[in-house]
Amino acid sequence: MEPDGLASLVPLDPAAARPLTAQIYDALRGAAREGRLPAGARLPSTRGAAAALGVGRNTVAAAYDLLRAEGVIEIRPGAAPVVLCGAVAPRPRRGRARPAAVPAPGPPAPATLGPAAAADVHSPVRRASPGWFHPGLPDEALLPRDLWARTLRAQARGTHGRRLTGGEDSHGLDRLRAALAERLRADRGVVVPPERLLVVNGTQAALLLTAMTAARPGEGALVESPGYGGARLAFAAAGLRVSDLPVDRHGADVSRAADPAARIAFVTPSNQYPTTARMPLPRRQALVDWARRADALVVEDDCDGEFHWRGRRIGALQATGPEVVAHMGSAEKTLAIGLRLAWLAVPERWVEPMRRAHRNLGLGANLHAQATLAELMQSGAWRAHLRRIARSYREREALLADALTRRLGRRVGLRRPDGGLQSAVELPDRASELRCVAALAAAGFSVGALSEYGGDEPGPCGLLVGFAQATPALAERFAAVLDAALSAGAKGETTADPASLLPPRGRSFQCGSNSA
């Protein structure tokens, strides 16, 4: 099917309460069931469909993912989506007629599921079990298992353990919120009373909470591009229209926002994910001024804020606009990746709505985990642990940077972060990116492809490399594999089938500007 033919099958109403993703899903699902889209028909790519319908590619991709999950279409890497379940006339049966069967109930409509709740944003390489240098993962060997276990047992057996059976504030244990308020004030310049802190079961829960409270379904949301795909999914699952907030070497630039009338925006200003850029004060002030004019909420993810070792540490964005910025942090990368313990410092006007939504959605974190973290913070053990692992990660980042510089020189652009758990490596084009990801995956490394972190437009070409597990031997091996892959590309050799690495949604091979 040509992209222009799609418009006649998918009439869209941007003013309708139902999100555009759901409208596309409904129209294509109905056309397939009614036979207007026969089995075997090919749909346009996400890029072609987005251009024909006048919407973002992620909007089409989310609808395609829902249709694929239901078995309406099939999506193969590098190929156009194919309709699987066009209408088929029933085959006549011999013998006595039987009563008509009651149709089996289908899956919930997207409005119930959330239009993108089941979307798959990972490329095949990153969907596999994590290997070495997976971005965003801490080194489990540095996590304080014994300390955590001892403290947890003590909390469960003591006076606090008896209080954890009920009666505590469902929005977070009082003493944890008091400890968090002190830590945020001292370390990040975030001045909030404990009553304005909410403890939730993970960062995705925090994002969903803000999305469902600060905006109505159908209203606009901004997410950094390139940026964190989990924020895009959470906002889309809440029924919001997600648009790009472009990122360059100075972080997010709200003056280039695709939807200036959006009601919520997600940013990582202190250590932009995935580019590692740090947002300067003029950009921060512009973002806060926009939020005030638009009556919008800015969600600040203090991404890897505990790990900072280079340059002057600047305060949180929340300190610039406390009435329009919600500050988010978590313990998942400092204590345990599966802990599911995060927190939100909420502007005054949003406290009561978010407390009610927090209760209604059941987003509270495990009370025993909260009590354990509170004890570690109050005793000073947590701060000592942070200093220890920050030193280790600083040394490991230097190991990787030195190996890449010695082996590759200026053949790649290495963005050395001021902190965090990953570095960005710039590459010249998408072909180089695919070749390097494939070669590294074959050698046991599961790095991210920077172009896949883009929103409506692909991100810059390059690699997102976690260094938390780096050792001298692993850093040298990584640099050698990357060197070999780039050398093979320069000679015109092939190290892998690039089509095997294309993401499920069939994104174009073109990358965005490397100025990002």
Image: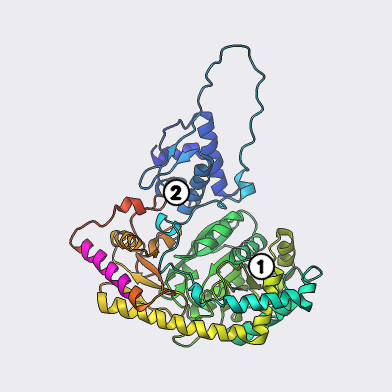
Residue lying at the far right of the rendered structure? 167
Q: Label 1 crowding class (10 Å Cα cut-off): few <14, some 14-19, many 20+?
A: many
Taking the image as shown, residue 426 lies to the left or right of residue 24, namely: left
Question: Is residue 482 found inside the magenta-colored segment of the image?
Answer: yes
Write down the quadrant of residue 191 in the picture: bottom right
Mark 2 — residue? 50
Mark 2 element type: helix
Tell me the quadrant of the picture where the N terminus can be found: top left
From this view, report whether residue 383 is shown above or below residue 462: below
Describe the colour scheme in one phrase. Answer: rainbow
Q: What's the mark number on residue 200? A: 1
Tell me the quadrant of the picture where the C terminus can be found: bottom left
Q: Which residues are magenta?
A: 475-488
Q: What's the mark number on residue 355? A: none
The structure residue drawn at horizontal position 64% and vertical position 66%, both measured from the top left corner, is 201
Disc 2 residue type (three-letter): Ala
Which is the main secondary structure of the residues drawn in magenta? helix
From this view, report whether residue 499 is shown above or below residue 159: above
The structure residue drawn at horizontal position 48% and vertical position 45%, both measured from the top left corner, is 64
